[in-house]
Amino acid sequence: MDVFHCIRTRRSIRKYKDKPVVWDNVVEILQAGKYAPFAGNIFNVKFIVVKNEAKRKAIAEACVQQYWMQDAPIHIVVVGEPEKAERYYGTRGVRLYTIQGAAAAIENMLLTAHSLGLGSCWVGAFDEEEIRRLCSLPEHVNVQGIITIGYADEAPSPPPKYRIEHAMFFEKWWGRVEGPKTAMGMWSPYVKHVVTQTHKRIKKHSKKLVEKVKEKFRKE
Ligand SMILES: Cc1cc2nc3c(=O)[nH]c(=O)nc-3n(C[C@H](O)[C@H](O)[C@H](O)COP(=O)(O)O)c2cc1C
């Protein structure tokens, strides 16, 4: 599946079929998480795969009673190890890089699940202490997110998204205007073509106009 198509068509799935996921697929999803970019290539996350039904129910309960989660045959609890990043980057490693690395890994895993024909959802609402207890996590790690994986039993419509023009500025905050050639080029080759042609015509006609004015003055 083409990457952009995969990104565009991925949806959060909250209804799952009662069908197990092939283990190879789970491993491929975890590999995708591993291949995410990490600051300084310090890989400081661990993935806890939860298949046990009772534990999945308990996790769903701990995720502010999102009971739909328990029907997903696989949960992946993404655990951060902030100490590793702190050693190299101090507070920035803890407050920024660990979270960003985990988020990059999660997105990679969601996209890979989708490319394998599986549904998934990123779950961020949870009682951390309860997840910590359920997964026997040591003190020095923290819960970054939980992913549900399984075969989708729904096909949600795409949620509304901003038009890209509303999400982009040029050169500075609220920078709306740029020279037409570069700005238009970013949006569409056709618009760029029209702008270039118009620019050429204006140049050609203004040249003719200047010649006419000059000729008129010469005659007078
Ligand atoms: C940090 C984060 C936390 C999220 N937490 C939850 C959650 O607890 N429960 C849930 O159902 N969806 C959760 N989502 C999924 C979003 O609701 C979903 O991505 C959004 O509505 C857009 O829909 P889409 O994923 O289909 O594009 C979370 C997404 C992110 C990025």
Image (tube, grey):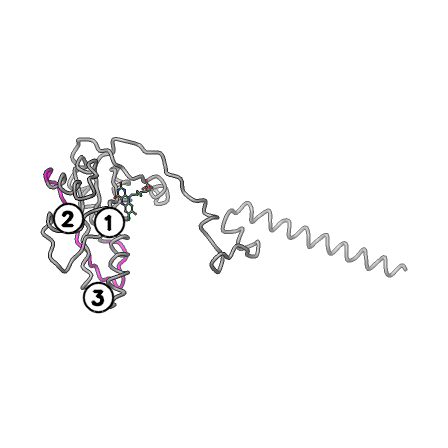
Label 2's element?
helix
Give percent across and percent down for residue 88: 23, 68
Which one is closest to the eye, mark 1 or mark 3? 3
Q: Going from the N terminus, do you reach mark 2 or mark 3 first?
A: 3
**Who's the residue at 27% across and 60% down the image?**
97
Name the amino acid, label 1: Ala
Q: Quadrant of residue 18?
A: top left
Give percent across and percent down for residue 182: 53, 55
Give percent across and percent down for residue 181: 56, 54
Which image quarter has ligand 1? Answer: top left
Q: Are marks 1 and 3 in contact (CB under 8 Å)?
A: no
Q: Going from the N terminus, do you reach mark 1 or mark 3 first?
A: 1
Is residue 110 rendered to the left or right of residue 215? left
Q: Please give the label number shown on residue 32.
A: 1
Magenta-colored span: 35-54
**Who's the residue at 27% across and 65% down the image?**
92
Residue at the right extreme of this rendering = 220
Q: Please give the label number shown on residue 185.
A: none
Is residue 220 rendered to the left or right of residue 171? right
Calculate the distance from the C-alpha at mark 1 to the C-alpha at mark 2.
Answer: 23 Å
Q: Which residue is mark 2?
A: 131
**Who's the residue at 18% across and 64% down the image?**
83
Is residue 37 rendered to the left or right of residue 54? right
Label 3's element?
helix
Foreground of the two, 159 or 51: 159
Q: Which residue is mark 3?
A: 86
Name the amino acid, label 3: Glu
